[in-house]
Amino acid sequence: MSTNWQIPRRTFLKGLGTAIALPMLDAMVPVRAVASMTDKTKPPTRMAFVYVPNGAHMQDWTPSKVGADFDLPPTLRPLAPVKNDLLVLTGLTHDKGRTNSDGAGHHARGATVFLTGSQALKSEGAEIRAGVSVDQYAAALVGKNTRFQSLELGTEAGRQAGKCDSGYSCAYSNNISWRDESTPTAKETNPRLVFERLFGNGSSKERNEGQAKRDRYKKSILDFVLEDAKRLSNRVTGNDRQKLDEYLTAVREIENRIERAEKDTAASTIVLPGYERPAGIPASFEEHIRLMGDMMVLAFQSDVTRIATFMIANEGSNKAYPFIGVNNGHHELSHHQGDRNKQAKIAQINKFHIAQFSYILQRLKSIPEGDGTLLDNCMVVYGSALSDGNAHNSENLPVLLAGRGGGTIRTGRHVKYEFETPMCNLLLSMLDRVGASADYFGDSTGRLVGLEA
């Protein structure tokens, strides 16, 4: 390969109804720029938010030690492989998730405030109001650099209207992303539809034709871009060739898993009057979470978006977890009233969620990028807008921040903040790092100290 040859960063492998963006390759960076790694050539910083409902059993969540020598308590032990890549942040508060004279409805307020820092208008009708969420604020400013401004994922669809929590619209409980103060950004829960969105090309008619042809001939989406892929592979260096092969293998592996999920779902679904489980949603909840997480990773790796949100479950979710020995509903258990047996089951659910988060982080960490890994160039917040689900309190929230934010965050620590430190201070600091700085966000009182590398 000529050392002067360079691939445009926005290169796609194209075929009928298909457009596969490429990961960051060495050939995308001019040789003269590699040594200096200017702002225009270094990998971009991505931002993601992973949300879990109903708070946490904080006794099994909170490390006993502060600083770099912190311990991983039972709930956080699945994070051991990525301990040095994250921060445990304790003491953060979302004041606008509290009652503030609005009465009951902590779950609805909690999901709404998590990324907006705004108090939800108590309404179960058409008039809903919150605030622009931090992901959408950033997407409006930096989203022009990518194919998609943002990516919204979830596992539970939920209603967007009607009453869900003590006089609050279901739109509040079922969304964390808000495009403006009255418009939640709907999330996608079907892995097949996410896959087609990420790798589809052209009009919906062309995408549908491509899907129909693939189904008819049992072909992979990669079969439609094979000629493009071979031509590119012959022009790049061995290192880039390996990166390309690993990336396309990951795309195919996800495609296979979605196909298996569709077959398993079709075989296991009990058909009820008026009910049909969407194709592509795995019967296994763990596989559902991991598939969605893997597609978020691919979206970041290929730079089709730099902003993502992922609701592992809707706020107030009463999902049971029999596959880990918990047959009670999650929300039901969160009202534990001090019952140690219920608290132990909550801790089991918390640990299951953390294990899935650890899986996503390890996937990000496994992908080389620039002088480090894809995780190094990310900021991934994981948490809930409630602390103890029984008390419905909004202070001392369970919050993790993973990734080094492009080298601006010093990870591998437990940082304890003063009581009532606004979580919006963290959100404001993250906006700086993705190039979407603001003077304030929500009820922020300044940047969050203690993150700096």
Image (cartoon, rainbow, N blue to C red):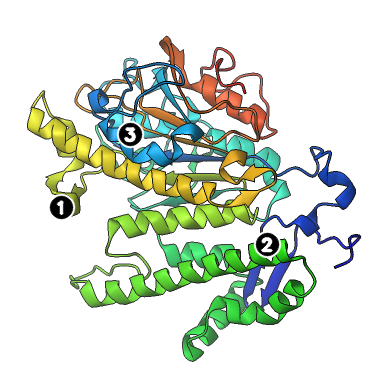
- Give the alpha-carbon distance from disc 2 to disc 3, as whole Å: 34 Å
* Residue denoted by label 2: 22
Q: Nearer the viewer, mark 1 or mark 3?
A: 3
- The numbered mark, 2 or 1, whose residue comes first in the sequence reads 2
Quadrant in which residue 232 is drawn: bottom right
* Residue denoted by label 3: 76
Q: Residue furthest bottom?
A: 217
Q: Residue at x 81, y 52 (%)?
A: 29
Q: Secondary structure at mark 3?
A: helix
- Give the alpha-carbon distance from disc 1 to disc 3, as whole Å: 21 Å
Quadrant in which residue 103 is drawn: top left
Neighbour class for label 2 at 10 Å: few (<14), some, many (≥20)? many
- Residue 379: x %, y % from top left: 55, 36
Quick check: 179 left or right of 6? left
Nearer-the-camera pick, 410 or 124:
410
- The numbered mark, 1 or 3, whose residue comes first in the sequence reads 3
The disc labelled 2 sits on which kind of residue?
Leu
* Residue denoted by label 1: 322
- Give the alpha-carbon distance from disc 2 to disc 1, as whole Å: 39 Å
Position of residue 221 relative to residue 334, above or below, is below
- Residue 75: x %, y % from top left: 28, 34
